[in-house]
Image (tube, rainbow, N blue to C red):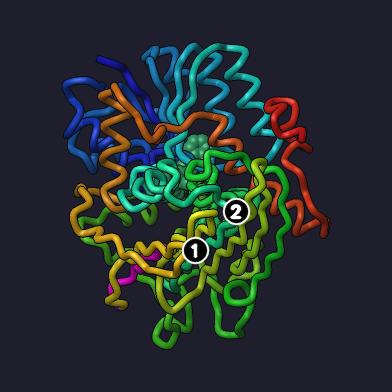
């Protein structure tokens, strides 16, 4: 039986970790206490889940009182490093949500602390456990594409999911590193993992054209807005069933001032909503990647051009679009083979069932991991490394090499 504590009792912390530990992993895991900078939000955990769990605002005190084996970090991204390093120094292992952190200085601090203390950090890349991505990984690992020469990858967020990032803390670069770190860490990790390669050089462009101060009709937040009746983006935070959002955010506002339904057209927003990135990998593959945060539909498209043919995979996640997943291989004779994904084992749970499989591996341990789906700090660093390099490239208008900030930890980047 391992003892866990969690810091950051928001949406992800409660629903993806505290509740499952209490309800599905009682035989192997105990959640001893939780902590949040917002004391009301920390105390809401017990109220919402109906279990008495000690709630702290002082992280060090929580560690001293409970002496956990593992600390789970689910705070706002920019504070991951602070808690990861403290937990390692206290003698704990760490499970941290993605992105591992948001900039190069904090990334170096985590890598250094892990090496110095000998304790371990696991980064939870749940997307690796989505059946369709595992299928791609298997296809490429089996050599069915031959050498992969290039990748084209487009991630498309619609005006519901995409907009949600621009209402919340994510839309301020200092919190999230922008979407190219916060969101794209999943995507860059997938490609690093599928190619079994490391990214060495990055060029990027970005712009904000849809959200931010792009219209006159805007306010502070939806609840107080004068344009509530006419704005197509009006969002009723209090409308969720069971009062989860009300209890977690509205009732806690007076303690930290965090407004969860801030206007999408606010002038405090400073992240991009269009991003375009080129990456060169160590073994020679190149990738063109784009992230759009305001599309009419939601989904993604991945293309791999290899020596034996071309693999095209796409999935549409918006219920308004009734199109199946496509997994199509074109051989060198131009024949197209469609793979039927209906028999791929899918589990219930968040992010296409991937959260459930990830948790089994985290809390029950795993005996075999043939596809290498569990991720460490190297994967965490290499994926945010592309985002951090992309941010630098956009700012400085130049090509950025990951060795500039990760070379001391990973000499293989110094090609
Ligand atoms: N893997 C995934 O698919 C996935 C999905 C959602 C969120 N996440 C990650 O989970 C984390 C939390 O996201 P969320 O959606 O739950 O956000 P949230 O806003 O609901 O929760 C964040 C929590 O962090 C707390 N916090 C902020 N600053 C803090 C500090 N200095 N010390 C302690 N607590 C602090 C906030 O009070 C809040 O309770 C993020 O890192 C996010 O990237 C991952």
Query: In the figure, residue 129 lies in which quadrant?
Result: top left
Q: Earlier in the sequence, mark 2 or mark 1?
A: 2
Who's the residue at 25% across and 56% down the image?
A: 243
Mark 2 Cα shell of 10 Å, populated few (<14), some (14-19), many (≥20): some
Q: Residue furthest bottom?
A: 230
The quadrant the C terminus occupies is top right
Identify the residue under disc 1: 155
Identify the residue under disc 2: 149
In the drawing, does residue 415 fall left or right of residue 56? right
* Residue 209 disc label: none
Who's the residue at 38% across and 35% down the image?
A: 371
Q: Which mark's residue is nearer the viewer, 2 or 1?
A: 2
Query: In the figure, residue 160 lies in which quadrant?
Result: bottom left
| Residue 339: % across, % down | 29, 60
Residue 4 visible, this orientation: yes
Front-most of residues 187 and 89: 187
Magenta stretch: residue 226 in it? no
Which span of residues is magenta-colored?
A: 313-320
Magenta stretch: residue 314 in it? yes
């Amino acid at each position: 039986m391992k003892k866990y504590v969690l810091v950051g009792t928001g949406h992800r912390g409660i629903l993806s970790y505290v509740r499952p530990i209490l309800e599905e992993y009682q035989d192997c895991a105990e959640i001893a206490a939780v902590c949040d900078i917002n004391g009301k939000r920390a105390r809401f955990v017990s109220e919402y889940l109906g279990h008495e769990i000690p709630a702290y605002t002082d992280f060090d005190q929580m560690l001293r009182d409970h002496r956990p084996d593992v600390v789970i970090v689910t705070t706002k991204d920019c504070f991951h490093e602070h808690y990861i390093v403290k937990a390692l120094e206290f003698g704990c292992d760490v499970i941290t949500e993605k992105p591992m952190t948001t900039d190069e200085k904090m990334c170096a601090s985590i890598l250094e602390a892990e090496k110095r203390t000998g304790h371990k950090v696991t980064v939870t890349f749940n997307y690796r456990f989505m059946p369709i991505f595992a299928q791609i990984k298997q296809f490429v690992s089996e050599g069915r594409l031959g050498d992969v020469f290039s990748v084209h990858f487009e991630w498309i967020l619609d005006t519901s999911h995409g907009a949600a990032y621009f209402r919340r803390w994510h839309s301020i670069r200092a919190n999230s590193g922008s979407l190219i770190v916060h969101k794209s860490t999943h995507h860059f990790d997938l490609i690093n993992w599928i190619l079994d390669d490391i990214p060495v050089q990055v060029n990027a462009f970005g712009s904000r054209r849809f959200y931010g101060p792009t219209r006159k009709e805007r306010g502070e937040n939806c609840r107080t807005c004068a344009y509530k009746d006419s704005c197509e983006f009006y969002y009723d935070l209090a409308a969720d069933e069971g009062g989860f959002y009300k209890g977690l955010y509205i009732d806690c506002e007076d303690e930290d001032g965090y407004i969860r339904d801030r206007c999408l057209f606010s002038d405090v927003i400073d992240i991009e909503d269009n991003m375009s990135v080129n990456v060169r990998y160590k073994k020679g593959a190149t990738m063109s990647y784009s992230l759009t945060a305001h599309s009419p539909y939601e989904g993604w498209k991945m293309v791999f051009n290899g020596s034996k043919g071309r693999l095209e995979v796409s999935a549409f996640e918006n219920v308004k679009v009734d199109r199946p997943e496509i997994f199509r291989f074109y051989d060198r004779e131009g024949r197209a083979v469609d793979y039927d994904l209906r028999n791929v084992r899918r589990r219930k749970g968040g992010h296409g069932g991937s959260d459930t499989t990830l948790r089994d591996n985290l809390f029950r341990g795993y005996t075999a991991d043939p596809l290498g789906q569990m991720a460490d700090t190297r994967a965490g660093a290499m994926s945010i490394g592309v985002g951090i390099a992309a941010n630098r490239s956009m700012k400085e208008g130049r090509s950025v090499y990951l060795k500039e900030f990760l070379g001391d930890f990973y000499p293989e980047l110094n090609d």
